[in-house]
Amino acid sequence: MACSKIFSGDLPEITSEILEHLRNDFSTLYSCILVNRLLCRTAIPLLWENPFSIPTQNCHFIEIYLHYLNESDKTKLDEIGFNSNLIPSNPLFNYPNFIKCLNTFRMVFFIEKWTVRAISTYKKTNNSYTYSSAINFKKFSKLIYSSLFNIFINNDVKLNIFETEIITDKNYEFFENVIEIILQNPNFIYNIKNLKLHIYNISDVNLSKINSFLTFLSSNCNNISSLYLRFQNMFIKTFSHIINSQQNLQKISFSCNIVPLHLLLSLKNSNYSNTLKTIVFYSVDFKNTVNLTEVFEQLNVLESIHILYCHSLNSIFVQQIINLSKPFKLKSLFTSEIFPIESFQLLLQKSGDYLENIGFESLTNSNELLLLIKTYCTKISIFELRGLDNQNTHSALNLIKNVSLNLNCLFIDNYSNYDDLSSIILRNLGKILPSRLEYLNLSFKIKLDDFKIFLKDSQNIFIKRLLIRNRMFKERVNILPYIKEYIMKNRRVEYLAIDEILNNDKKELYSLKDEVKEFGLYNIKVQSYDNLNICCYKYIRDI
């Protein structure tokens, strides 16, 4: 009865709340459009608030946006031969008004993809028109790019999230065209809460425009709650101004070779000593950084620190943490470097109670390292293991068993060709996993007998996202019949990705359309490995 009322439109508030929880489940949202008017009106804004993020082969949404072109941009497109028949007439909704999130890098990707299709379509329908010039292709794509910005601004869009990545000359050439548009229309990004700036490899001749844009941000966008910065040293001063101009900064992410002294010291600003809750350091070299104690002592409401593949995590770094008079709430630690055991122990003694996400590229001195994690860290939720060998596999399995109560995501990648390692893992892993996992990713050589044991041992476990990469070295091993028998028929997963690699030849379950349909009958969504794969440190960096 309650469900029928919801989907008939009698309870619009509840319907809206339910779909809000499905905002990242695009296939379900698309299905909702077809149910009734209420669900359609509720789902459409969610699908169009960040259209450039949706993993799709279809770029049709760009044509829908172009319906809203102003006369000036229409004229410019006509002059280079744009086929106006591609533009749909009378859209049902004011689609541009729904956009809340914009990533300029993704935007260029979709525009170029759509442009290839648009040009191909026009060639087929107009033999007198040729569009082979790379210069014209670029000119056409850049004009669509700037036209979309004009469309958003003319529809009074006010973004919540703005992300720009300028890391190649092409990125700059596109973004250069819209800098002036943004500067002249400050309301477009005035209300942004999340700002991501990834600016690298900028030539000297382009510095002036980028600096003018960054200065504009520091003067006009002062209520940012989440700030992600990846930059060259030449922008340090301007980025410091952006940080210092904030009134409600709650999360900041640094991604650069060296975090300069005065950039770190800007975190002591009284504006956010009582607002900043999360700091993420990604690929930062802490060499010569000696002011960490001073900075962290000033942050009164800090809830989590994430250190992701950083460098120089040595005794000097750890000693600064030990010297803190307050807790160091280290929530995530991912590293590709060999961590000195003595320093690692001191760090875990200080922060082990807070550590939830951990991953290692190298497991040198691994037995001691894994034992320390087992001793000091009981709340592990995300665990990424690479570089297993005959010396540490049993210790790793013991640790997984020890943290299974809170374990949510597990990634095991054994890229060696040792048969014994994958056999040990598969013959033991199913017995120690928790009853439910959000994410399990297994990547190694699989032998059928071992795999069958794993499936039998884990048949009472529900895994929301299961990814299997079978690294075969001599001959192909077909694990699909076992997947169907133990997983598909028992509906033990919600999302599934399987790929097989043999001599650099890669085959995916996702490419087998009949198999995908069969799994769909059991409500299992088969996806490509890359789309379903969670890069753990990126996932943590972006939460």
Image (cartoon, helix red, strand yellow):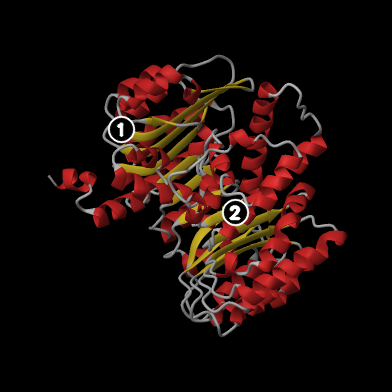
Is 346 placed above or below 36 here? below
Name the residue that disc number 2 marks. 151
Residue at 44% x, 48% y is 93
Q: Outermost residue, bottom direction?
A: 270
Name the residue that disc number 1 marks. 492
In the image, 277 versus 170, the foreground residue is 170
Q: How crowded is the residue under tag 1: few (<14 C-alpha within 10 Å), some, or many (20+)?
A: many
SS at badge 2? helix
The answer to whether residue 233 is seen in the rendering is no
Locate residue 252, reporting x and y percent. 57, 67
Q: Earlier in the sequence, mark 1 or mark 2?
A: 2
Asked if labels 2 and 1 touch by Cβ distance under 8 angstroms, the answer is no
Residue at 33% x, 37% y is 34
In the image, 473 versus 207, the foreground residue is 207
Choose mark 1 or mark 2, whichever is in front.
Answer: 2
In the image, 447 versus 393, the foreground residue is 447
As drawn, the label of residue 239 is none
Locate residue 477, reporting x and y percent. 49, 16
Locate residue 84, reporting x and y percent. 63, 37
Q: Is residue 35 left or right of residue 384?
A: left
Report the amino acid beneath label 1: Arg
Q: Is residue 214 left or right of residue 28?
A: right
Report the amino acid beneath label 2: Ile
